[in-house]
Image (cartoon, rainbow, N blue to C red):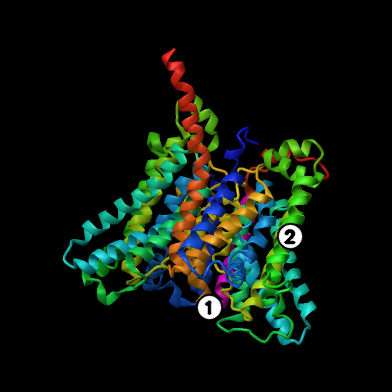
């Protein structure tokens, strides 16, 4: 924790969110409108839902590159379930179940077979996405039962979408787990020094496995939302999302070296990215150009503390040299 | 100081496996063993080999370069556009320009890692998105197709010399250069030192950040060359060129025995890792695996290969801290 609260990551992010909001409102007459704002939230809810457990995973010094591939595989499974006439609740459970199975597969590779997580999940990413392509080929599945569209297109309270409410609830639960439970403290301990954590009696591998399964489950759930919102399944579903999700987590102030980060930061980063991408699309700026903005944002925000620390040491060194 | 960069068991195993696959395939499908088929398989793998060698330098220093594929797309697009605008500009000059530009992009990553101490995975995740977006900006989203490129631009990579294409020769030259540089040059040896123990490296006066910066610049330099090669070989440049290829490059390195934790990895290993992936990729259509299942099979192969690799890696280092029942 910084002694200067205005330099805290979350404060910077909150300021950036406010600036993005004001800029959007000034630049587009269509922005300040309940329906528009609600639409804007679809830019981040699904990704942010996966970003929450991913944040825990990165805090524990692991990573999962296969999340988007898990989403595609879960969606293909749900597509087949729908063709077989499964009811909506069974489809949701199927999607989450596929996510859990894939997450367990990643977790076992990392814990039981001792493969570094980045390497293991690069492999399973091709595997999961490849199975989705192999099973579905170039076909599209779009025969989902009535009621399935609620998850991605439903609005329980006014213009507030089901996706947004689900994400907020998930953020609250993840935040409580990380910041207010023993399990949360142990996740930080594992990320800061896994050996020391194990020596202090933390079942490190059990936590790692659980985090991979949680990330898989969240990917399955995000797949339910996305499939329901699009109303169709293609094997190329959510392609490239893994990097956007990881960017979201890092932008939220989670250290890739592990042991540091907050859920509030991740939520703010998700909202910030959602506002920026939505605002640029309101200005008719094509999606690929947004990636320049997101990439720059990522580097600049991560560089800020390093630059300010350099300036601080330079300032501290100056009087010493004079004296 | 002796750093063992060649671990015979793993490399021989991988080499024999690849050879066995080639022999088995040739026995069943004689057309696989023809010179023309093997030559085209080598051509298909040449760019992977070059990129993986560059990536290896970065991973050995405990870094990772996720931006290589975007670098390929950006430099490829820039030289394709220049070729379209000035069809008479000498191709060698364009290739040199691609290397310079790629090296500049790599140095951008390297300086951020060195001067600001930012984590390589974050820097290259960001620069990957920036480079990819810039491809769209410089091209305006249009495709530069073969009819917009001069014949010389496309012919250079295919030009045969002593039976092999320029592409294959470049991969061979790159391999030899990388092997000599990393084994016999001071800067090359330092990459291993920095990767195996950055603190010790700093104590003996080797700046770990500087070594990483050198590795990133070289990786970018190679990616720039590959940008020209890719666009010329496939005769098309567009925004999504080589999308996702960075992960295949990293997979080739890991299969070849480069430790993702830095400090170990060898050029013969990386070469074999690339050839292994190349043979698998060329064999799948031959065996009759549907194109849609090929990604799954290569994913499975990559996963198994990395598991075997990690199993083979010094388990004794871990045992000390392993408690009996965890």
Q: Chain of mark 1?
A: B
Magenta span has A74? no
Q: CA distance from mark 2 to mark 1?
A: 39 Å
Q: Nearer the viewer, mark 2 or mark 1?
A: 2
Q: Is residue B45 above or below residue A90?
A: above
Can you tell which quarter of the image residue A166 is in?
bottom right
Disc 2 is placed on an element classified as helix
- From the viewer's side, name the closer residue of B240 and B278: B240
Check residue A150 in the rendering and tell me which mark sits there, or answer none: none
Residue depicted at x 67% and y 74%: A152
In the rendered view, would you say A105 is above or below B268? below
| Residue located beneath label 1 in the image | B291
Query: On the rendered image, what quadrant is the C terminus of chain A found in?
Result: top left
- In the rendered image, the residue lying farthest to the top is A323
Q: Is residue A203 left or right of residue A313?
A: right
Count of labels in the image = 2
The percent coordinates of residue A304 (x first, y second) are: 50, 41
Left or right: where does residue B255 sit relative to residue A1? left
Position of residue A179 measured from the top left corner of the image (x, y, whole percent): 75, 46
Circle 1 — which element?
helix
**Residue at 63% across / 79% down in the picture?**
A135
In-image side of B191 versus A38 (left or right): left
- The part of the image, by quadrant, that contains residue B235 is bottom left
Residue at which label 2 appears? A170
Q: Position of residue B178 (x, y in %)?
A: 39, 47
List x then y, in percent, for residue B268. 46, 50
Residue projecting furthest to the left: B88
Name the subunit of mark 2.
A
Magenta segment's dominant SS is helix
Badge 1 local density, few (<14 within 10 Å), some, or many (20+)?
A: few
Q: Start and end of the magenta stretch?
A: B289-310
Q: Is residue A100 left or right of residue B127?
A: right
């Amino acid at each position: 924790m910084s002694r200067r609260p205005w330099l805290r990551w979350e404060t910077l992010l909150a300021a950036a969110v406010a600036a993005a909001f004001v800029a959007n409102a000034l630049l587009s007459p269509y922005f300040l409108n309940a329906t528009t704002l609600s639409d804007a939230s679809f830019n981040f809810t699904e990704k942010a839902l996966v970003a929450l457990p991913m944040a825990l995973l990165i805090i524990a010094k692991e990573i999962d590159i296969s999340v988007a591939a898990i989403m595609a595989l879960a969606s293909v499974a749900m597509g087949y379930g729908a063709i077989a006439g499964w009811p909506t609740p069974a489809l949701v459970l199927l999607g989450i179940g596929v996510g859990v199975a894939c997450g367990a597969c990643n977790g076992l590779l990392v814990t039981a077979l001792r493969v570094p997580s980045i390497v293991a999940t690069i492999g399973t990413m091709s595997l999961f996405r490849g199975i989705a392509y192999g099973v579905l080929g170039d076909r599209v599945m779009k025969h989902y039962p009535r009621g399935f569209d609620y998850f991605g297109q439903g609005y329980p309270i006014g213009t507030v979408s089901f996706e947004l409410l689900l994400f907020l609830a998930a953020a609250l639960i993840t935040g409580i787990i990380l910041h207010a439970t023993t399990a949360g403290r142990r996740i930080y301990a594992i990320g800061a020094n896994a050996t020391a954590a194990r020596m202090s009696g933390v079942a490190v591998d059990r936590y790692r496995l659980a985090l991979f399964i949680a990330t898989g489950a969240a990917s399955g759930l995000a797949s339910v939302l996305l499939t329901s919102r699009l109303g169709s399944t293609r094997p190329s579903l959510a392609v490239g999302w893994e990097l956007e999700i990881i960017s979201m987590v890092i932008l939220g102030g989670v250290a890739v070296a592990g042991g540091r980060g907050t859920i509030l930061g991740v939520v703010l980063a998700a909202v910030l990215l959602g506002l920026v991408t939505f605002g640029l699309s309101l200005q008719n700026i094509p999606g690929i150009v947004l990636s320049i903005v997101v990439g720059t944002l990522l580097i600049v925000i991560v560089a800020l503390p390093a630059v300010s620390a350099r300036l601080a040491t330079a300032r501290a060194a100056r009087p010493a040299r004079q004296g | 100081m002796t750093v063992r960069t060649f671990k015979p068991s793993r490399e021989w195993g991988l080499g024999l496996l690849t050879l066995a696959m080639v022999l088995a395939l040739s026995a069943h499908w004689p057309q696989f063993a023809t010179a023309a088929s093997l030559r085209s398989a080598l051509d298909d793998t040449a760019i992977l080999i070059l990129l993986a060698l560059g990536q290896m330098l970065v991973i050995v220093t405990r870094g990772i370069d996720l931006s290589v594929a975007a670098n390929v797309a950006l430099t490829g697009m820039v030289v394709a556009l220049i070729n379209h605008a000035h069809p008479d500009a000498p191709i060698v000059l364009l290739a040199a320009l691609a290397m310079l530009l790629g090296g500049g992009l790599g140095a951008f990553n390297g300086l951020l890692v060195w001067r600001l101490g930012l984590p390589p995975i974050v820097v290259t995740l960001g620069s990957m998105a920036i480079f990819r977006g810039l491809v769209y900006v410089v091209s305006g989203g249009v495709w530069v197709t073969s009819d917009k490129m001069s014949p010389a631009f496309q012919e250079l990579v295919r030009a045969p010399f002593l039976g092999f294409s320029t592409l294959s020769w470049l991969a061979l030259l790159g391999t030899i250069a990388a092997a000599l540089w990393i084994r016999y040059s001071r800067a090359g040896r330092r990459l291993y030192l920095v990767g195996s123990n950055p603190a010790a490296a700093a104590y003996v006066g080797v700046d770990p950040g500087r070594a990483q910066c050198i590795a990133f610049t070289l990786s970018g330099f190679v990616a720039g060359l590959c940008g020209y090669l890719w666009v010329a070989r496939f005769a098309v440049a567009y925004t999504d060129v080589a999308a996702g290829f960075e992960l295949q490059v990293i997979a080739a390195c890991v299969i070849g025995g480069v430790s993702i934790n830095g400090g170990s990895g060898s050029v013969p290993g990386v070469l074999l890792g690339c050839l292994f992936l190349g043979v698998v990729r060329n064999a799948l259509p031959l065996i009759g695996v549907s194109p849609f299942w090929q990604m799954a099979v290569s994913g499975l192969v990559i996963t198994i290969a990395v598991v075997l690799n990690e199993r083979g890696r010094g388990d004794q280092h871990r045992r000390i801290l392993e408690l009996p029942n965890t």
